[in-house]
Image (cartoon, rainbow, N blue to C red):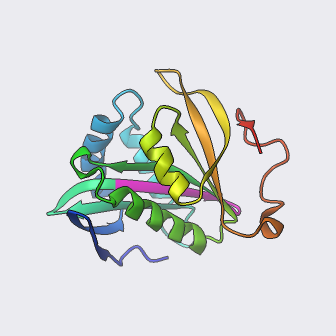
Amino acid sequence: MTGEATERTTTGAADCVVREMRWWDIEPVMELEKDLFPQDAWSRGMFWSELAHSRGPGATRRYVVAEKDEQIIGYAGLVVSGDQGDVQTIAVARDHWGTGLGSRLLTELLRAATSFECAEVLLECRVDNVRAQKLYERFGFEPIGIRRGYYQPGNVDALVMRLRMASDDDSADATSPDGEQGTEIHD
């Protein structure tokens, strides 16, 4: 996957460019991160670490930003291990909620998961974030468990959701028999 290509899209009122996240995007992404996730915002170091694994032949990450008028209005990231993808983050500036930008960012991550040949994609979502849950359900994600006290310091539970990228026969071995660490699995 080359990160040099950009794609122009019109998502409702947000005419934006979605492109690979680079190191110079970390500061504006941090501003958005702190606004949207004040209790459990990622650190600069976390973003640096993720981007360090997003390029080259051994890349296991895909991070993108949405830009409008030279301003970052959203970002998203995926990590891959074996044939399993995990959505790490999706964020859209508040003034762009409801424009379809979240869908556009999730679509980009699912394209990356396909390129990485993932059999399934997992994600965690705050149990109180119904708006995000509905987005994920529209894409075919299904709830499979709860991670108790996942979001700290608020001690908020996470709903674990999964999207199978292949038929059940193809992905039968993709899930470990005992599920994810610290996750209650309800198939």
Question: Residue 3 location in percent, x, y?
Answer: 40, 73
Q: Which residue is drawn at 64% across and 32% down?
A: 147
70 or 2, nearer to the observer = 70
Locate residue 185 relative to residue 128 in the image: left or right: right
- Quadrant (top left, top right, bottom left, bottom right) of the C terminus: top right
Which span is picked out in magenta?
75-83
Residue 180: x and y, percent?
Answer: 73, 41
| Residue occupying image coordinates x 62% and y 47% | 161
Residue appearing at x 54%, y 53% in the figure: 137
Q: Position of residue 45 (x, y in %)?
A: 41, 42
Q: Nearer the viewer, residue 38 or 11?
A: 11
Magenta-colored stretch includes residue 81: yes
Q: Between residues 158 and 30, which one lies in front from this camera angle? A: 158
User: Which of the 4 image quadrants contains residue 115?
Assistant: bottom right
Q: Say if the magenta span includes residue 80.
A: yes
Image mark count: 0
User: In the image, is residue 59 above or below residue 128?
Assistant: below
Query: Left or right: 98 with respect to 3?
Result: left
Q: Residue at x 52, y 21 (%)?
A: 155
Looking at the picture, does residue 19 appear above or below residue 91? below
